[in-house]
């Protein structure tokens, strides 16, 4: 039957992917990387076909779809993140090999679970019996492995976290109105991880509606995100310079930088009709922009309220540079990317490709009038390690200010 054929293919696909993982870890060759990327894509395709044959809308099997979701996440991590990092230097890092070891172990476990599941596939229901629990737990564990490799500031591991009570106390100090909030406060039980930021997510609800969302850094307790969804912006209308002062004062209470570069975009809130001043502040140290510590603050013209704040890292120091690749060599190596770009000095960045550690990089920005793309190249290796762009077109002004 087609089910039997697909089942046989699925077992082979799991084994093929395990072999490809082991070969990449053993040889580190470009061919073995390509083989793994092909194998994991085939595994996802065959697993999907197997699910289609064994469930229907009337008889859904959640453990199977959870397993597929975890494999799709793994595929994306291997193809886009492991693959891109490998291509930049044509070699595996220590973090990559640890990741591959963990994948191999989990695929071996999947093989056992699959064999147990296949014997009783018709009996699987959308309930939590032992085998269902095994597959659901496997999916959770596999997602965690992919997430920690892709997003953790300490790749493949959780860093040490502060207790949530301490961040809740800090929120009340930053936002007194939240300390007296007349509604419910909900904090997600587990620490969330995204692009090197480990954070507690706290929502403030009134009548089942989200009024405020806050992310607090689970490592150092800094504010990472604040969003005001109330739309209750009252008071006098504020304009550019006053809005800038409001934003700067708010930032100075949180991050005492001596010098920042600031710029602004002006947008319109579709719901309230208010003008929104979207400020961006980038700390400057020793004439280098600390791009990793970029801060975004949105101020509403109605009442001058801070309605959004975001940042990823704080107090980043400039790392030591032992050697530098010449700018000319980088421009020659990446000349196809520099068609409409111009050199814009040195910056400090963090990204997946730097393992979220600070790296000094050459900064190139687009010369096209409406483009806000910027590319960053590690001064030591010459490899591209970061790319950034703005969702809004900037108003034509930029200043560098001492934060006295």
Image (cartoon, rainbow, N blue to C red):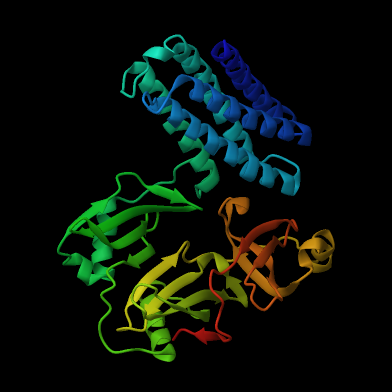
Q: How many marks?
A: 0
Q: Going 39% across and 48% down the picture, which residue do you hit?
A: 192
Q: Quadrant of residue 55?
A: top left
Q: Residue 134: percent from the left, percent from the top?
A: 40, 21
Q: Going 42% across and 33% down the picture, which residue do you hit?
A: 140
Foreground pick, 141 / 172:
141
Q: Quadrant of the N terminus?
A: top right
> Is the residue 144 above or below the residue 229 in the image?
above
Q: Quadrant of the C terminus?
A: bottom left
Q: Residue 235: percent from the left, percent from the top?
A: 25, 86
Foreground pick, 260 / 274:
274
Quick check: can you spot residue 307?
A: yes
Q: Is residue 185 left or right of residue 283?
A: left
Q: Going 28% across and 70% down the picture, which residue do you hit?
A: 174
Q: Going 37% across and 13% down the picture, which residue do you hit?
A: 123
Q: Residue 212: percent from the left, percent from the top?
A: 28, 63
Foreground pick, 17 / 378:
17
Foreground pick, 30 / 70:
70
Q: Is residue 179 left or right of residue 259?
A: left
Q: Quadrant of residue 358?
A: bottom right
Quick check: can you spot residue 218?
A: no
> Is the residue 177 above or below the residue 100 in the image?
below
Given the current orientation, which residue lies at the most extreme front position?
A: 58
Q: Is residue 111 left or right of residue 184?
A: right
Q: Residue 217: percent from the left, percent from the top?
A: 38, 57
> Is the residue 60 above or below the residue 205 in the image?
above
> Is the residue 182 above or below the residue 367 in the image?
above
């Amino acid at each position: 039957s087609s089910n039997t054929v697909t089942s046989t293919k699925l077992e082979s696909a799991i084994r093929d992917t395990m072999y490809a993982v082991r070969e990449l870890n053993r040889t580190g060759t470009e061919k073995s990387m390509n083989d793994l990327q092909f194998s994991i894509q085939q595994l996802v395709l065959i697993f999907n076909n197997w699910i289609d044959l064994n469930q229907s809308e009337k008889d859904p099997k959640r453990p199977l779809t959870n397993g597929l979701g975890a494999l799709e996440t793994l595929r994306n991590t291997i193809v886009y993140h492991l693959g891109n990092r490998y291509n930049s230097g044509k070699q595996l890092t220590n973090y990559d090999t640890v990741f591959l070891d963990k994948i191999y172990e989990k695929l071996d476990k999947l093989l056992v679970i699959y064999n147990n599941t296949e014997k009783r596939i018709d009996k699987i229901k959308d309930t939590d019996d032992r085998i269902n629990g095994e597959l659901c737990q496997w999916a959770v564990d596999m997602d965690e492995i992919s997430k920690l490799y892709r997003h953790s500031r300490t790749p493949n591991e959780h860093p040490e976290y502060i207790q949530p009570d301490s961040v809740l106390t800090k929120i009340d100090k930053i936002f007194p109105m939240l300390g007296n909030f007349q509604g419910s406060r909900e904090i997600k039980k587990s620490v969330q991880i995204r692009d090197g930021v480990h954070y507690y997510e706290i929502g403030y609800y009134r009548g089942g509606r989200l009024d405020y969302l806050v992310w607090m850094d689970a490592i150092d307790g800094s504010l990472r995100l604040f969003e005001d969804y109330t739309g209750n912006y009252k008071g006098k209308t504020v304009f550019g310079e006053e809005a800038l002062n409001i934003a700067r004062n708010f930032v100075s209470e949180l991050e005492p930088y001596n010098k920042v570069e600031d710029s602004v975009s002006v947008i319109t809130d579709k719901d309230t009709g208010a003008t929104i001043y979207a400020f961006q502040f980038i700390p400057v140290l020793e004439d280098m922009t600390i791009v990793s510590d970029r801060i975004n603050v949105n101020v509403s013209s109605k009442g001058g309220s801070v309605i959004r704040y975001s940042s990823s890292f704080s107090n980043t120091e400039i790392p030591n540079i032992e050697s530098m690749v010449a700018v000319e060599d980088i421009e020659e190596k990446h000349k196809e990317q520099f068609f409409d770009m111009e050199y814009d000095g040195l910056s400090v960045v963090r990204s997946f490709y730097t393992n979220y550690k600070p790296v000094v990089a050459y900064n190139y920005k687009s010369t096209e009038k409406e483009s806000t793309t910027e590319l960053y190249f590690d001064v030591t290796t010459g490899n591209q390690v970061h790319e950034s762009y703005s969702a809004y077109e900037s108003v034509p002004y930029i200043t560098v200010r001492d934060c006295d």
